[in-house]
Image (tube, rainbow, N blue to C red):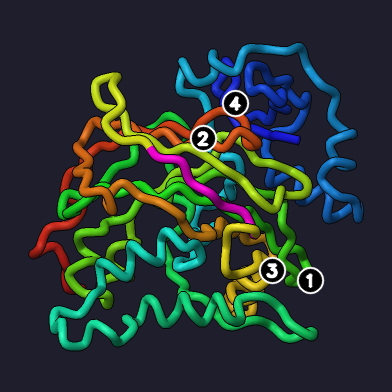
Amino acid sequence: MLLIQYLDTDGQPAVGLLSADGEQYRPLVGLTSTYTLAQAAIASGRDLAAALQDYPLGAPAPYAELLDRGALLPPLTHPDPAHCYVTGTGLTHLGSAATRDQMHQKLNRQEHAELTDSMKIFQLGLEGGRHQSGQPGVQPEWFYKGDGGIVAAPGQPLPAPDFALDYGEEPELVGLYIIDPCGQPCRLGFAVGNEFSDHVTERQNYLYLAHSKLRPCAIGPALRIGALPAALSGDSRIERDGKIVWQKPFLTGEANMCHSLANLEYHHFKYQQFLRPGDVHLHFFGTATLSFADGVKVEAGDEFVIHIPEFGPALRNPVARAPAAFDIEGVRAL
């Protein structure tokens, strides 16, 4: 089951049920957000699919019309963006580990036989990235991206900061969560995500990873409710002036990861500060491929297109360069 959030023709937020082929959607009459749906499900002790039965379906309408008028929204939002955490984990897929290792190779070739920190973390995941005998697996790499204000809607520009050295896409699965009144994380489902990063900044020194992740991102268009297939294959590409300048398939899902999703979730939500009732979490699960590894230099105006068939229509976002947000002399003493 696929859900989308959008603005209706009156500019009001709405939720729709997307057809399996992604061609049409049907409004869920009276439902204004997936956040409201999740709260209703929690309050009534039902799952999302059952809670959806409270909302009648409107007449079918073309999905393309929403995209054409820029009406799509991220599939899960919080009324206050400051109460939405955007986080993630890396080195969960073999492709990303190989790329990261290449970026972090030591300059002293005499030490080539020694594993980099990236490959050490990845090796730990291969050996113990899943729960065993009731015990959690090893903890993965973890990073913070921002709050809900950094999440671009499908079709909308990804505004790279003026100081960015790279505009790098990262096609990923994203887990979408809300914390219930008792502090229990509840997963609504999954979405396709573009965990936009700055790989040139990261390549300078792996300790710059945290800086490289403080970038916007995009999620959607659809929230997939229900069981996630163990193996998923998708396609990631970059279009420039209507032409494809780079394209590559990728594999994801637990069958293609060294960590189980349960282990990644545990090592995020084990921290008390992430269990505040009512908060939303958008958590990226790592990438398997990226154009940076193939020497592609993305330019402002290029469009990222990420598609996993099981999630409906592709996630599309052009790249834009944002003006400077903060002046070097901008701190004001009080």
Q: Which residue is mark 4?
A: 12
Say left or right for 100 vs 260. Answer: left
Which quadrant of the structure image shows residue 145? bottom left
Q: With 163 as the anchor, is 171 left or right in this view?
A: right
The amino acid type found where label 1 is placed reads Cys
In the rendered view, does 52 fall on the left or right side of 153?
Answer: right
Q: Where does label 2 land, which residue?
A: 307
Camera-near label (3 vs 1) is 3
Q: Measuring 58% from the left and 73% from the top, which residue is drawn there?
A: 268
Residue 27 position in % (x across, y down):
72, 22
Residue at the image point whose x is 74% and y is 60% from the top:
186
- The answer to whether residue 226 is above or below residue 243 is below
Label the magenta part by its dominant secondary structure: strand
Pick the quarter of the image with the N terminus.
top right
Write down the residue under mark 1: 182
Q: Residue furthest left?
A: 329
As rendered, which of 112 and 59 lies closer to the eye? 112
- Residue at (30% x, 87% y) in the render: 114
Point out residue 81 in the picture as x, y percentages from the top left corner.
50, 52
**Secondary-structure class at tag 3:** helix
Q: Which residue is mark 3?
A: 262
Give the mark, 1 or 2, whose residue is nearer the N terminus: 1
